[in-house]
């Protein structure tokens, strides 16, 4: 079970984050200010810190600086209402690993948490610390072996096709925008980027996994929003 520390002074937001993360099987601690967050990081040794930038007594930038100067390599996901480029760049310069701009969706936050834990070797998709099997229609997906079968027959997906499929599966039916998928799968950071990459890979997934790719039952387009996966 991965331990996550939330450092957030907004009690309602901290409660919602804790509930969402605990529902996913994570062990969660909460700190309400910068110094307490710094102390808990050093004492409880979490696998991930979710850190607000606007904190009492010591802001998130200072918390990051203290952690990195002290040799702490714990991944840090920054929560910020400041979406301007200089603020984001400063957070990265101080040692942040990723950021989410408020307001954010729970699905996006959970996807970023999983991505950071995977990169650090602490990935967990639940309390047992292992990815579970996924099924939709006649398709079965095994994240541990990165294999896909349809009606019991193996399906050959490229690495990016598999990552895209997992990004949709882990949202549990929630809509993923094209840019969210570009960030999760291809690590794009520029919201202004124009590319057909996601659409091309979605078309390939439909070709390989749908009975009728032109009229998909599972990998669905949500008009003017993005894509979602239906069971």
Image: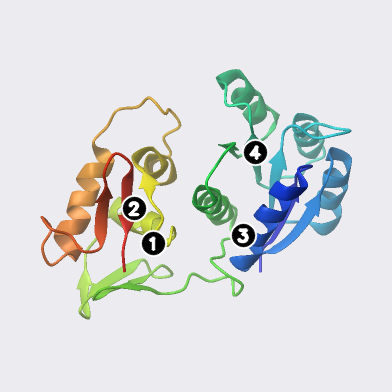
- Furthest residue toward top: 86
Across and down, in percent, residue 183 comes to 43, 40
Image position of 83 with respect to 11: above or below: above
The image's mark for residue 169 is 1
Circle 3 — which element?
A: helix
Of the residues under marks 4 and 1, which one precedes in the sequence? 4
Q: Nearer the viewer, mark 1 or mark 2?
A: 1
Nearer the observer, 182 or 73: 182
Q: Nearer the viewer, mark 4 or mark 3?
A: 3
Total numbered badges shown on the rendered structure: 4
The image's mark for residue 20 is 3
Across and down, in percent, residue 27 comes to 71, 65
Query: Rounded to the nearest whole Å, what is the CA distance between mark 1 and mark 3?
Result: 17 Å
Q: Nearer the viewer, mark 4 or mark 2?
A: 4
Image position of 45 with respect to 187: above or below: below
Circle 2 — which element?
A: helix
Q: Which residue is mark 4?
A: 79
Query: Rounded to the nearest whole Å, what is the CA distance between mark 1 and mark 2?
Result: 9 Å
Q: Which residue is mark 2?
A: 164
Q: Nearer the viewer, mark 1 or mark 3?
A: 3
Quarter of the image for residue 168 reads: bottom left
Quarter of the image for residue 26 reads: bottom right
Across and down, in percent, residue 31 comes to 82, 49
On the rendered structure, is 56 left or right of 208?
Answer: right
- The reply to whether the C-beta atoms of the residues labelled 3 and 2 are less than 8 Å apart is no
Quarter of the rendering occupied by the N terminus: bottom right
Circle 4 — which element?
A: strand
On the rendered structure, is 67 left or right of 131?
Answer: right
């Amino acid at each position: 079970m991965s331990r996550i520390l939330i450092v957030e002074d907004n009690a309602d937001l901290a409660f919602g984050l804790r509930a969402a993360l605990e529902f996913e099987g994570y062990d969660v601690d909460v700190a309400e200010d910068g110094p307490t967050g710094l102390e808990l990081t050093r004492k409880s040794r979490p696998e991930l810190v979710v850190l607000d930038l606007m904190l009492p007594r010591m802001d998130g930038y200072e918390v990051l600086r203290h952690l990195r100067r002290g040799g702490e390599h714990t991944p840090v996901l920054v929560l910020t209402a400041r979406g301007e480029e200089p603020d984001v760049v400063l957070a990265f310069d101080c040692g942040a690993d990723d950021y989410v701009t408020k307001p954010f969706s729970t699905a996006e936050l959970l996807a970023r948490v999983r991505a950071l834990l995977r990169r650090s070797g602490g990935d967990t998709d639940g309390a047992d610390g292992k990815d579970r099997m996924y099924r939709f229609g006649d398709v079965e997906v095994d994240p541990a072996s990165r294999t896909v079968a349809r009606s019991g027959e193996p399906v050959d997906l490229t690495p990016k096709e598999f990552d895209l499929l997992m990004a949709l599966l882990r949202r549990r039916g929630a809509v993923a925008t094209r840019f969210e998928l570009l960030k999760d799968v291809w690590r794009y950071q520029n919201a202004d980027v124009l590319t057909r990459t996601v659409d091309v890979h979605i078309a390939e997934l439909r070709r390989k996994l749908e009975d009728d790719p032109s009229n998909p039952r599972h990998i669905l387009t949500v008009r003017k929003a993005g894509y979602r996966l239906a069971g």
